[in-house]
Amino acid sequence: MAEKEFVIPKHVAIILDGNGRWAKKRLLPRKAGHVAGAKTVEQICEDAHNLGIQYLTVYAFSTENWKRPQDEVDALMKLLRQYLKDCIKRSTKNNMCVKVIGDVTPLAEDLKKSIEELEEATKDNTGLHFQVALNYGSRDEMMRGVRALCEEVKAGSVDVTDISEELFSKYLDTKGIPDPDLLIRTSGEERLSNFLLWQLAYTEFYFTDVLWPDFNKEELQKAIAYYNGRERRYGGV
């Protein structure tokens, strides 16, 4: 019997969880965990590309994260400002194409400008396609998509009978991006937390107790090995 081919997933999505617990274990403020987590994102982008992953999507800030203590939200926004500033240089160096998904309208004007500049500067890069979910919630994404589609129907540019899964997907933030093959969630939690609900319909899930700042290339390889051990069946066959 021929040995099963080892496959690198084309698109990996990650729910970055455990920054706060990582900091608490070290008697550090929560913002120290977020700083450490941001450094892990940088390294995993490089590792993912070197392993042959083409698309990487990370859940950085959800629509629910605004409910966190104000000082933590402020620290996250400060970290985001610095990350976006550094990301253009890093993405140019690594030939990485960066796209932000989510509703950015509530973000400060300087952040929105930085996001626009980053996406414009990296749009033609041909290396890793890196999606960052900011102020993202999957239900919110689908509601925004429904409203946009309804406007098209109302205007007469789309006929109701033409609406399909393929058409609706074009109204989502992930338009043009293949659905994830593998979802990773760190820190031991086993829920989706309103992340890519539409896109994860046929995705393999991998949960690990490792806290996000401790996640590394070896842990990523473990997740990929798990993915390869799954028997993927379609249509109940």
Image (cartoon, grey):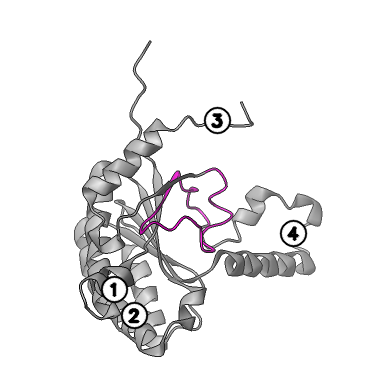
Identified by mark 2, the residue type is Leu
Please state which of the two labelled residues, at mark 4 or mark 1, is closer to the viewer.
1
Can you give x and y, in whole percent of width and height, for residue 191 in the image? 50, 57
Upstream in sequence: badge 2 or badge 4: 2
Q: For the point 21% across and 77% down, which residue is it?
A: 27
Can you give x and y, in whole percent of width and height, for residue 109 in the image? 41, 87
What residue did someone put label 2 on?
A: 76
What residue did someone put label 1 on?
A: 34
Up/down of 62 relative to 43, above or below: below
The answer to whether marks 1 and 3 mark residues whose Cβ atoms lie closer than 8 Å is no
The quadrant of the picture occupied by the N terminus is top left
Up/down of 53 relative to 110, above or below: above
Residue 169: quadrant of the picture: bottom right
Can you give x and y, in whole percent of width and height, for residue 46 in the image? 23, 54
Identified by mark 1, the residue type is His
Question: How far is disc 2 from disc 4 in space, using C-alphas?
Answer: 40 Å
Q: Do we see residue 88 in this rendering?
A: no
Identified by mark 4, the residue type is Val
What residue did someone put label 4 on?
A: 158
Question: How far is disc 1 from disc 3 in space, using C-alphas?
Answer: 38 Å
Identified by mark 3, the residue type is Arg
Upstream in sequence: badge 1 or badge 3: 1
Please state which of the two labelled residues, at mark 4 or mark 3, is closer to the viewer.
3
Up/down of 201 relative to 102, above or below: above
Of the pair 97 and 83, the residue shown nearer to us:
83
Q: Which residues are magenta?
A: 175-202
Badge 2, how many Cα within 10 Å: few under 14, some, many 20+? Answer: some
What residue did someone put label 3 on?
A: 233
The answer to whether marks 2 and 1 mark residues whose Cβ atoms lie closer than 8 Å is yes
